[in-house]
Amino acid sequence: MADLPVHTIVFEILTRVPAKDVGRSKSVCKQWYALLSTQDFVRIHCSRSLVSSNQRVLLIDDLTCSVHPIIFQSNDYGPSSIVTFPFHHHNNDVSILSHLNGLLCVCLNHTYELLLWNPTTTAFKHLSTPDSHGFYINNLDAIGLYVDADDDYKVLHIKRRSGVLGVYVYSREVDSWRNIPFITRQEYLSPHFNWSAGTFCGGTLYFTVCECWIGGTNVVICFDVNSEQFKEISFPPVPSTGMVQGVLVNVKNELHMFASTGMFEMTIDLWTLQGDYWIKVLSCPPIPPISLSLWCDITHYVTNGNWFVMTKLGKLFTIEMDMKPFECFYPVTWFRGFKGAVFVETIVSPSI
């Protein structure tokens, strides 16, 4: 270590410190500011920050936004800190659509504008443009946030407007939107199909596309982020005798799906994608009957060997799995009565 240049020693140490400490370290001197602002430093610091201890829960209610650490031993939240939105907004106005590497893609509901926001550094970037790009309509559009092979953060925006589908990509590097082709089945344009947010895993964005009635069509749409080609793969072979809901999650760079089926009584299975085929990992124990209004709001997350099934009104039950590799949270958008997300604290910037 004594033979290494000071620059290298500083680099190696500071890529391992928490994101907020990196921000403070930038004020030490001009050399440190320049070093800590390089894309190489940001990329390596981000890769070393993607651990469970750096995960935080962001909760938004009508009046406040708070960030909580996660206590894995008790599967609960730690003491909160209040976050002030750095952008103009109205009460109950901010919806979180997607997240990746500490960046959140959010929508301002009163204007439909899209933004990229890092709640750790407070930096943000408006994505809407005068030519109508970057405006999101709930229940019609779908959003996916990803990084391509050139380390460019991008947003995929799938828009359905009066039976016409448009697909657009925003690039952080060039700060602009562009249209890309999307050949798909015409019926997926119908509002009867519900598109999930995109889940980024292994160079691909995955969307569940589910028909909103019993026995309807359910598929997974895949977007290769480097070739920018789409393809369709099958849904896990779940019963079609009730409502179907698929929740995708990236666990250690492997795609998994919580597949829920049923009406008043529900079954939930965990599947993993191998190639283009789904392999069942486990099934949960029988679940007591749940009212349909709650069922439609259910999401799931896994941490420290426990599998939680929740609605926006609270936790329904916990399943002990003894699966330590699944120490991660699914980034839900509704839980414990709040809108929110689970994110990792990084210094990744929403703009270059």
Image (cartoon, grey):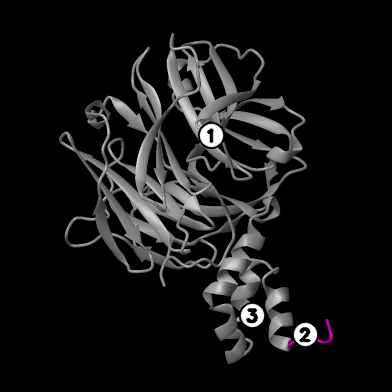
What quarter of the picture does the C terminus occupy?
bottom left
Q: The residue under label 2 is which amino acid type?
A: Leu
Residue 203 magenta:
no
Residue bounds of the magenta highlight: 1-5
Give the labeled residue for mark 3.
25
In this rendering, position of residue 51 left or right of residue 30: right
**Amino acid type for the residue under numbered disc 1:** Gly
At x 39% / y 23%, what residue is drawn? 218
Q: Amino acid at mark 3?
A: Ser
Would residue 122 be visible to someone looking at this image? Answer: yes
In the rendered image, residue 189, in percent from the top left (x then y), is placed at 24, 32
Where is residue 303? Give x, y as percent: 68, 39
259 on left or right of 205: right
Work out whether mark 1 precedes mark 3 in sequence or the reverse, and give the earlier one.
3
Please, what secondary structure does the residue beneath circle 2 have?
loop
Sooner in the amino-acid sequence: mark 2 or mark 1: 2
Say which residue appears at 69% left-offset and 25% top-offset: 319
Residue 137 coordinates in the image, percent (x, y): 27, 43
The answer to whether 62 is drawn above or below residue 234 in the figure is: below
Q: Residue at x 44, y 20 (%)?
A: 244
Q: CA distance from mark 2 to mark 1?
A: 44 Å
Near-viewer residue (4 or 97): 4
103 is higher (above) or lower (below) than 281? below
Q: How far across and how far down the image is residue 113, in percent?
A: 29, 54
Q: Which residue is mark 2?
A: 4
Secondary structure beneath dot 1 equals loop
| Residue beneath the point at 68% across and 74% down | 14
Q: Is residue 281 left or right of residue 349?
A: right
